[in-house]
Image: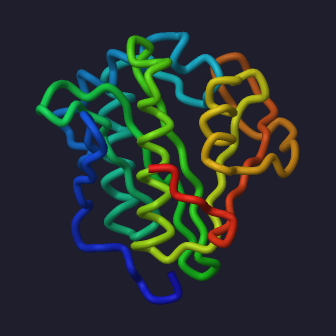
Amino acid sequence: MSHDRLPADIPAIHFGDYLLRLLEPGDAADLHAYWSDPQVTEFTSTVVNSMDDVTAAIQYSSDAFKSRSGLRWAICPADGGHMVGDCGYNQLDQRHNSGVIGYSLAKEHWGRGVATRAVNEMVRWGFTTLDLHRIEASVHPENHRSCRVLEKLGFRREGLLRDYRLGRNGYFDCILFGLLRPEWTDTG
């Protein structure tokens, strides 16, 4: 992203029966519903104590896009149903053409391939639209579901980041995953 390739508006991206669309303030109740589930956030640094926490997270996402440093999508059924997850670039580094991704999904949608397909679309968009060279993610070592999502998409385990994130139970290690554009194979 040596030249700012981030579009003025976040695009909607369709994939099968789902789509990625701009995360909006009206998504707060849906986001709160699954972020409040301890199983969904068990291996993350997401801590939700109130609707204010969710509203602040949505505002943070909006501010990141305005500053060209990140962006977030809602994962929704293509027929316009309620938001079932979220994903995005938590950090975009224009100087180094890299991005750091994150994602979460409501528990009732686990095991259906939704996260894998959503992350694939996000990765495709990053490599083709933003011309990124590197995309990375950090995952709690016990979050086997998330590790499998990344490995299915060709991400490689690159190392262990000690006490890298702070969650509700204190600091925890993360596995660093990385994918370089020349290694990428579109699975969609």
Above or below 94: residue 141: above
Q: Position of residue 45 (x, y in %)?
A: 61, 31
| Furthest-left residue in this view | 80
Q: Is residue 139 left or right of residue 78?
A: right
Q: Position of residue 72 (x, y in %)?
A: 37, 49
Residue depicted at x 25% and y 29%: 83
Image quadrant of residue 50? top left
Between 166 and 11, the one nearer to me in the picture: 11
Residue depicted at x 44% and y 72%: 128
Residue depicted at x 62% and y 70%: 181
Above or below 133: residue 106: above
Between 156 and 138, the one nearer to me in the picture: 156
Above or below 47: residue 88: below
Image quadrant of residue 29? top left
The colour scheme used to paint the residues is rainbow
Q: Is residue 176 left or right of residue 25?
A: right
Instruction: Give the number of callouts.
Output: 0
Q: Is residue 158 left or right of residue 128?
A: right
Image quadrant of residue 140? top right
Between 187 and 116, the one nearer to me in the picture: 187
Q: Position of residue 87 (x, y in %)?
A: 43, 42
Q: Position of residue 134 (x, y in %)?
A: 65, 67
Q: Is residue 158 left or right of residue 130?
A: right
